[in-house]
């Protein structure tokens, strides 16, 4: 049960990170912007960014260590769209996701 | 007169079939949401709409078989009458089960005694009018929970859900008044359909806006 709850909140965090990237439009978002918008610790940010890249939901658009920028992939866009729909439906029934 | 009755029954079957299809659609999206998030209450919600759809389709099938196929004026032999009563009771029980699942899945995050209380109420009833009263009591809890949720989140999606459940409640209130009145019965069916349409609009808008 506890495991499930951790996973749920993780889904939410991943979606928040992707929203932060989407919010920056075509330019993409840097780690600092994602960190503040998704309200994350640095360790978690690194871990989840790697995971999102691995799952091909985001892409590292600029890999220079001083100015790394992440953008949403097409897969990421459709995942986020689906998540927003799920979030709205769940919220409409009073269910937190 | 008999012909008019059969027409009305067919209209009622059409309403319930559309309602059943919409219930299946809500169940589908709730399952999808459960698979994505692992939130158990979404699974309960999905099961609730599945059970509701099963109830509606069993009622449609039963009514079609007994009234349209055999004809209203022909009357039913005692065995068929018993079977029809069984189908009707099954329909009510399925709906009550669905509404109890709605109570459980849409409860507020802060724990209350409501689900247990409703489960106790569900136990011993087998007569139609009592089943309707029981259904209304359970639906009242569902509507109150939907209202409290709307009061908190104030989203249009929550308003559609509140409207849907409120229509279901009104539909059951009209059903209780419709003992000998076909028109009131039809109003009740139309209200139920409106409730399902509210859910359909919510699903559509949640994916579009």
Image: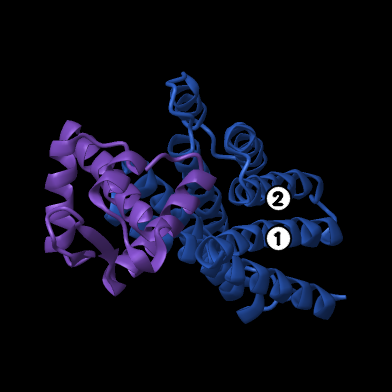
Chain colours: A purple, B blue
Please provide percent x and percent y for residue B43. Answer: 34, 49
- Label 2 marks which chain's residue? B
For label 2, the crowd category at 10 Å Cα-Cα, with few meaning under 14, some 14 to 19 and many 20 or more, is: many
Which residue is located at x 66 percent, y 36 percent?
Answer: B133
Depth check: give the residue in front, B196 or A95: A95
**Considering the image in quadrants, where does the C terminus of chain B appear?**
bottom right
Label 1 CA crowd tier, 10 Å (few <14, some 14–19, many 20+): many
Chain at numbered mark 1: B
Do the residues at discs 1 and 2 belong to one chain?
Answer: yes
Which residue extends farthest right? B1
Report helix, strand or loop for mark 1: helix
- Mark 2 highlights which residue? B167
Residue B81 screen position, x and y as percent: 59, 61
Does dot 2 land on a helix, a strand or a loop?
Answer: helix
- In space, the residues marked 1 and 2 are separated at their CA atoms by 7 Å
> Which residue is located at x 66 percent, y 56 percent?
B195
Q: Which residue is mark 1?
A: B194
> Do the residues bearing badges 1 and 2 touch, measured as CB atoms within 8 Å?
yes
Residue B124 visible? The answer is yes
Question: On the picture, is A64 further left or further right than B69?
Answer: left
């Amino acid at each position: 049960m506890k495991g499930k709850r951790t996973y749920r909140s993780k889904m939410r965090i991943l979606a928040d990170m992707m929203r932060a990237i989407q919010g920056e439009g075509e330019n993409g978002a840097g780690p600092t912007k994602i960190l503040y918008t998704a309200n994350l610790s640095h360790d978690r940010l690194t871990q989840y960014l790697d995971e999102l890249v691995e799952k091909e939901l985001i892409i590292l658009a600029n890999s220079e260590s001083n100015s790394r920028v992440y953008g949403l992939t097409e897969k990421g866009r459709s995942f986020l769209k689906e998540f927003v729909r799920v979030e709205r439906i769940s919220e409409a029934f009073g269910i937190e996701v | 007169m008999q012909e008019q009755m059969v027409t009305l029954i067919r209209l009622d079957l059409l309403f319930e079939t559309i309602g059943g299809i919409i219930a299946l659609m809500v169940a589908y999206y709730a399952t999808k949401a459960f698979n994505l998030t692992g939130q158990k209450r979404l699974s309960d919600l999905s099961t609730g709409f599945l059970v509701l759809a099963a109830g509606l389709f069993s009622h449609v099938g039963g009514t079609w078989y007994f009234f349209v196929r055999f004809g209203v004026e022909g009357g039913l032999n005692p065995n068929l009458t018993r079977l029809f009563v069984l189908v009707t009771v099954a329909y009510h029980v399925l709906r009550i089960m669905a509404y109890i699942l709605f109570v459980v899945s849409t409860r507020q995050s802060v724990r209350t005694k409501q689900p247990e209380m409703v489960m106790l109420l569900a136990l011993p009833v087998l007569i139609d009018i009592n089943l309707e009263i029981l259904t209304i009591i359970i639906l009242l809890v569902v509507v109150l929970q939907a209202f409290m949720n709307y009061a908190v989140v104030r989203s249009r999606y929550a308003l559609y859900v509140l409207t849907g459940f409120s229509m279901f409640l009104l539909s059951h209130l009209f059903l209780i008044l419709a003992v000998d009145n076909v028109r009131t019965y039809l109003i009740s069916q139309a209200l139920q359909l409106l409730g399902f349409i509210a859910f359909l609009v919510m699903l559509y808008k949640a994916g579009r806006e």
